Amino acid sequence: MAKPAVLYVCQQCGMSHPRWIGRCSGCESWNTLIEEVQTSSPALKHHKQTRGKVIEFTKLADQSPTLPRALTGLAEFDRVCGGGLVPGSVILVGGDPGIGKSTLLLQVAALLSQRQPCSYISGEEAVEQVRMRAHRLHLQESPLLLASSTNVGEIIASLDHANAVPLVIIDSIQTMAIDAIESAPGSVSQVRAAAHELTRLAKKRGITVIMVGHVTKEGMIAGPKVLEHMVDTVLYFEGERGHQFRILRAVKNRFGATDEIGVFEMTQAGLQEVANPSALFLSERQGDASGSAVFAGIEGTRPLLVEIQALVSPASYGTPRRAAIGWDAGRLAMVLAVLETRCGIPFSTKDVYLNVAGGLKISEPAADLAVASALMSALSGKSLPSDAIFFGEIGLSGELRSVGQHEMRLKEAAKLGFKQAFLPPCRQKPALSQDLSVRLHEIALLKEFIHF
């Protein structure tokens, strides 16, 4: 009998190494190699390649039946998924430990089970523990089916039949294991094989499978990168434990828009939907404080108004400190360089702190003008107009570049009572509604903003 081969597999990229090394040569990650035993079946070793059956081709112009989407009852969750759950789709939900992934999916399954059968399979908790959480969320009367298992073979045997439940939640994919693979649960081999078997089941029976995925310390979903390629939708559940807000963000969606977000508020009764996130993010804003600016952004298909706060203080040491929470630190350094070089505003001897209120993370370049406005206000000690919004991208030469979807931003601002808007020159002025009660201040160069 041949001795099983031992390989060291990177848990980040899946690359195999014949011996242990501290740094993976594929993704250059440190301390990510785990020992895995590779076994080969004699039957497979001597198996001869056989010719498969001929596949059937259809024309692109042929009509296919429209797949009916299942509405869960949580409008924010349905929005991020593209308008509901598509039969046969596989969804991967990732997030930090304790952020509320299991709570969110338990609420989704409990609400949807009132209209169609749903099952919740936990590999991390016993059935009694899931019941305790459901009781705390006041969902104990839901007809949801519960099970606790980590064996993929048993799960597929229970679901692979004509009357399978339409929705299955696996919590989590890192706890699942296949008997034929000798590696420990959570390893690259186990995660890849378990996800493949569950995906195959979803496509075969038309079942919607939602899998919970753990994340690494870098914030990426643990396991091989191929896991995100195998599934149809990848959602990230974000938020700070100190804040009650939670953001569900789509980064991949074959059946809807990407970069869509859903906003929830964590309460004692579970996650509650936030119908108007802009009003909630601005509810505690003090309009007369210096260093505060309101940014009119776009998240997916939704306009969102958030407060950007800046603090400028004398540097205590030789090298000034730059800290940004909720925004790219590299982009902050660029805005500071433009303000100092093109506008003559000194920041080289100042510590700069930037924060996006509410725990939201912004990646849109249109926030440049709001950040610059907050920085200048914090440095001068003068507050910005409390009824004004800011948006626009800043170029390295100090010019303001136009951004898209002006009208959606302005309509959201008008709905919340804002009267002024500082923005780049509009390239498509006829597209703007004439009935908006927002006064527009068009700025071509960042220097011009200093005189307002």
Image: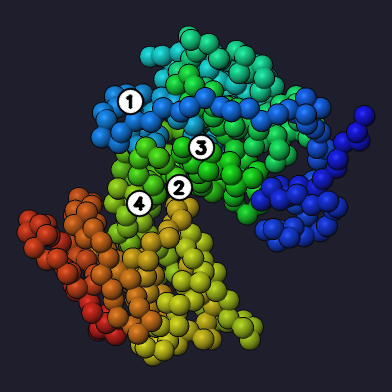
- In what quadrant of the picture does the C terminus appear? bottom left
387 and 410: which is toward the camera: 410
Q: Residue at x 55, y 20 (%)?
A: 120
The CA span between labels 4 and 3 is 23 Å
Residue 251, labelled with which disc?
2
Amino acid of disc 3: Val
Q: Say which of marks 4 and 2 sits in front.
A: 2
Residue 406 falls left or right of residue 47 = left
Could you give the CA–CA distance between mark 2 and mark 3, rounded to whole angstroms? 12 Å
Left or right of 157 in this view: 417: left
Camera-side mark, 2 or 3: 3
Q: Position of residue 380 (x, y in %)?
A: 38, 81
What residue is pinned by disc 3? 231
Which element is circle 4 on? strand
Residue 370, position as x, y percentages in the image:
34, 68
- How far separated are the C-alphas under marks 2 and 1? 22 Å
Q: Mark 1: give few (<14), some (14-19) or many (20+) Cα within 10 Å.
A: few
Q: In which quarter of the image is residue 96?
A: top right
CA–CA distance between discs 1 and 3? Answer: 18 Å
The answer to which of marks 4 and 1 sits earlier in the sequence is 1
First-in-chain label (4 vs 2): 2
View extreme (top): residue: 163
Q: Which of 52/424 is in front?
A: 52
Residue drawn at 11 percent across, 59 percent down: 431
Q: Is residue 41 left or right of residue 212?
A: right
Q: Which residue is drawn at 29% across and 51% down?
A: 303
Identify residue for label 4: 299
The N terminus lies in quadrant: top right
Q: Where is residue 68 in the image (x, y as percent from the top left)?
A: 32, 24
Q: Which label's residue is closer to the chain start, 4 or 3?
A: 3
